[in-house]
Amino acid sequence: MSTDHRIRQANLGDLETIVRHRRMMFADIGHGDPELLKTAEPVYTEWLRERLENGRYQGWLMMAADGTVEAGVGLWLIDWPSGVLDLARFRGYVFNVYTDRSHRRQGFSYRLMQVLLDACVAQGINVVGLHASAEGRPVYTALGFKETNEMRIVLEPHRKESGADPR
């Protein structure tokens, strides 16, 4: 990272930048349906505004000397019950990791992730998760992230029963 860059914590005034980064991130990973993004963006913007205000979303931005935001990362503090893996009240979930195309391969995401992980440690957050794009996976692996056994289902409204019985 060049010495003319600095990292600062995001605030409510950065709402539009974070939303723009999210839109561009989705487009870069192949989820760039303009109509879907247009529909989702106001809902996400309101969600983000609420969490920036209550501190459940924390973000960090990589700034050029002229004040231009060139990269960013976000941390969502998820209220989580204690369990066998962790007794902490919150889990961290990383998202909105984005670097403008012209500034990639300069270590910005790696450095931002280090700041995010340091903030987690300082807040007693011991478990941090994320979904990795193919391009981001090497960064997260280098920071110590491991693949887990999580599974997912995306439920469609009014979906028909499959009739399958797992027993």
Image (cartoon, rainbow, N blue to C red):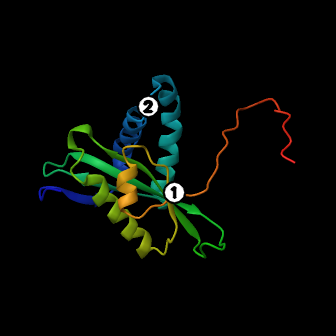
In the rendering, at what x and y percent does residue 69 appear?
25, 47
Residue drawn at 48 percent across, 30 percent down: 37
Element at label 2: loop
Q: Which one is nearer the viewer's eye here, 144 or 157?
A: 144
Q: Residue at x 86, y 42 (%)?
A: 165
Judge left or right: residue 91 versus residue 16. Answer: right
Q: Which is more toward the observer, 9 or 120?
A: 120
Q: Is residue 5 left or right of residue 76?
A: left
- Badge 2 crowding class, 10 Å Cα cut-off, few under 14, some 14 to 19, many 20 or more, is few
Rendered residue at 43%/69% (across/down):
120
Q: Quadrant of the N terminus?
A: bottom left
56, 120: nearer the viewer: 120
Q: Nearer the viewer, mark 2 or mark 1?
A: 1
x, y percentage for residue 163? 86, 34
Q: Amino acid at mark 1?
A: Glu
Find disc 2 in the rendering and name its residue.
Answer: 30
